Image (tube, helix red, strand yellow):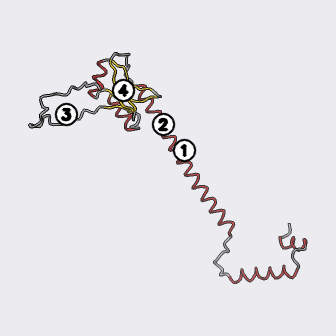
Amino acid sequence: MASLQDQLLKAGIVDKKKAKQIKQEQRKETRSRPKGQVQVDENKEQAKRALAEKTQRDRQLNKQQRDEAEKKAVQAQIIQLIRMNRVDRKQGDVAYQFTDGTKIKKMYITQQLQNDLIKGRLAIAKLEGGYELLPCKAAEKIMQRDAQVIVLLNCNDSVGVDESADEDDPYADYQIPDDLMW
């Protein structure tokens, strides 16, 4: 195949005089450069930059996919923990009210389950549009993964609290019941 210069000559775009002049300029350019220096090819540099940008985009895409896969795995673990540890709540006659965000929800449970909820032995978790009762240990494991799933978990931190009341408290004689319904 003929060089580009030969093709331009045949096409009549460039005459012989101009072709010789271009060739001489190219020779002068290569002679004027020091021997250790290589001519920088812009196409190669552009290709390297494009390859670097592509690998960076691929890394970001892979990171996003890994993050999404981890989120799905955590959600699957949460669902599995709830289904394995849920307490069977028989339809009770006691209405237990709790808040889910800004809404007040009501659940009918037995008196024993209500006492366990109040004392912090049980918790309420959200599962697929409904609510399930869980033991406290399972709820703590779920809260480590995603705290928004647990709707209600009463903590009993009163073990180390001094129960002595203020001496000047005018309401010291009136005790507040634990199962106060609102």
Q: Based on the displayed image, in which of its 4 quarters is residue 65 positioned?
A: top right
In this rendered view, identify the residue nearer to me: 28 or 54.
Answer: 54
Q: Earlier in the sequence, mark 1 or mark 3?
A: 1
How crowded pointer 1 is (Cα within 10 Å; few <14, some 14-19, many 20+) is rated as: few
26 to the left or right of 72: right
- The residue at which mark 2 appears reads as 73
How far is mark 4 from mark 1, CA to CA?
A: 32 Å
Query: Is the residue 95 above or below the residue 62 in the image?
Result: above
How far is mark 1 from mark 3, CA to CA?
A: 45 Å
Q: Earlier in the sequence, mark 2 or mark 4?
A: 2
Where is residue 132 drawn, in percent x and y? 40, 25
Q: Which mark is residue 171?
A: none
Residue at 64% from the left image edge and 60% from the top image edge: 50
Residue at 50% from the left image edge and 44% from the top image edge: 67
How crowded pointer 4 is (Cα within 10 Å; few <14, some 14-19, many 20+) is rated as: many
79 to the left or right of 24: left
- Looking at the image, do the residues carrying marks 1 and 3 touch, with CB atoms under 8 Å apart? no
How far is mark 1 from mark 2, CA to CA?
A: 12 Å
Q: Which mark is residue 65?
A: 1
The kind of residue on which mark 3 rests is: Val
35 to the left or right of 115: right
Where is residue 70 drawn, in percent x and y? 48, 40
Q: What is the secondary structure assignment of the residue under circle 1?
A: helix
Q: Based on the displayed image, in which of its 4 quarters is residue 30 positioned?
A: bottom right
The kind of residue on which mark 1 rests is: Gln
How crowded pointer 3 is (Cα within 10 Å; few <14, some 14-19, many 20+) is rated as: few
